Amino acid sequence: MGIQMVDVKSQYLKIKEEIDRGIQEVLDTTAFINGPQVKKFQKDFENYLDVKHVIPCANGTDALQIAMMAVGLKPGDEVIVPAFTYVATAEVIALLGLIPVMVDVNADTFNINIEGIKAAITTKTKCIVPVHLYGQAADMESIMKIAEEHKLWVIEDNAQAIGSDYTFSDGRKVKTGTIGHVGCTSFYPSKNLGCYGDGGAIMTNDDNLGELLHKIANHGQSVRYYHDVVGCNSRLDSIQAVVLGAKLPHLDGYCDARRKVADYYDNAFAEVDALETPFRAPYTTHVFHQYTLKVKNGQRDALKQYLDEQKIPNMIYYPVPLYKQEAFKASSNGLEYLDNTEELCKEVISLPIHTEMDEAQLAYICDKVKAFF
Ligand SMILES: *Cc1c(COP(=O)(O)O)cnc(C)c1O
């Protein structure tokens, strides 16, 4: 059936003409770095997100690192992160000499647990990095409240939830990635807004931070060859900006397409006792970067093996808690067990989800999954 976890090719074919033309223009003008396409995408993305500053950069991991540098975190400062996430979040914390403090997630939303955050705060805590896992926002209203009380920075890892809306209890609706002091995202090809190489962006509504973030991403300079702060070299190139510029007007449609796939799966699996379909938090629109089931009764690994045999793509995001990763054992303060994180590592499985899935593919996958149980 040719089912793929993510189908980047079919999506490209639908907007091929525009992308090819834009890339050819970059080739013709040779403005590979800082071409007008980058500035244009930056402005378009600021408008889409309704945020004051977007700082394009080389990838999502850089975005997180630059954000942490900009808010002035110092070696030894503690940064609170969920233990159940992609490694990039904790990696940059460790690279900067900061201490990742890993907190359990909720069993339903897969996102960082609010009581866990409160319990983890010490006099050394300086920052919280919530991750909007699989495309669903963490409880940002509670997180911002805690941050305000304890004077902490909040850096959102929005790499999996671009395009998602978040509604506060007073009815105010904003885009995820624009709620914390700084937001970070990735344009890795398989992300919901992906380019054709590496790319990332940093978002903020704070003018001072906006200027500093730009500066840090550009060798710490705002005037060429005058370096005010220690920075790095992190740029989005013009060709990637062309791809992102062409895709951005489709992003809301892409999110809807993913939600339709999720609805189909939800319906199909409603009667399968051993499967728990994704919980949808009322305060946010899930953009389903992943469609992740919980398999009860200890059957996850058997289901995975069966799907592999049936040639149905599937992934385990993520099989190991951060604190059990060899690289983070030293920095995890002897943490050995967080209930929900451990359980999720054993229960989750993600099925194919992307913007180009058709009903025949979905019916096929669902029939096979149901046949297993
Ligand atoms: C993809 C991802 C990143 C890193 O993005 P890159 O562009 O690959 O560096 C960071 N955090 C999360 C949660 C991600 O999914």
Image (cartoon, rainbow, N blue to C red):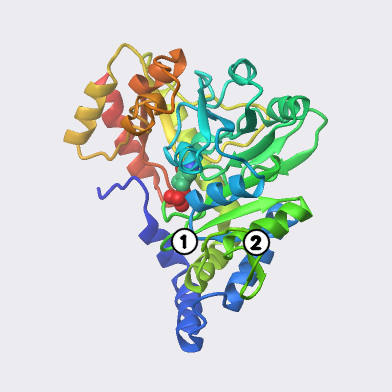
| Res 366 visible | yes
- Name the residue at 48% across, 72% down: 239
Compared with 288, 294 (above or below) is: above
Gap between marks 2 and 1 measured at Cα: 21 Å
- Measured from the top left, where is residue 253 in percent x and y? 57, 52
Q: Residues within 10 Å of mark 2 (few under 14, many from 20)?
A: many
The count of marks equals 2
Dot 2: what SS?
helix
Residue extending farthest to the left is 309
| Quadrant position of residue 54 | bottom right
Q: Residue at image x 40%, y 28%?
A: 322
| Residue 100 percent location from the top left of the image | 51, 31
Picture quadrant where residue 248 is located: bottom right
Q: Nearer the viewer, mark 2 or mark 1?
A: 2
Residue type at mark 1 is Cys
User: What amino acid does circle 2 point to?
Assistant: His
Left or right, 80 with reference to 357: right
Question: Which quadrant holds the C terminus?
Answer: top left
Q: Secondary structure at mark 1?
A: loop
Depth check, front residue: 131 or 160: 131
* x, y percent for residue 59: 48, 55
Residue 111 occupies which quadrant of the picture?
top right
Q: Is the CB atom of the residue marked by disc 2 within 8 angstroms of ligand 1's nearest atom?
A: no
Q: Earlier in the sequence, mark 2 or mark 1?
A: 1
The residue that label 2 is drawn on is 214
Instruction: From the viewer's side, name the closer residue of 267 and 101.
Output: 101
Instruction: Please state the horizontal and vertical placement of residue 141, each as a whole percent of the image.
Output: 72, 29
Q: Which mark is residue 195?
A: 1
Viewer-closest of 38 and 268: 38
The residue positioned farthest toward the bottom in the image shown: 28
The structure residue drawn at horizontal position 53% and vertical position 36%, both measured from the top left corner, is 98
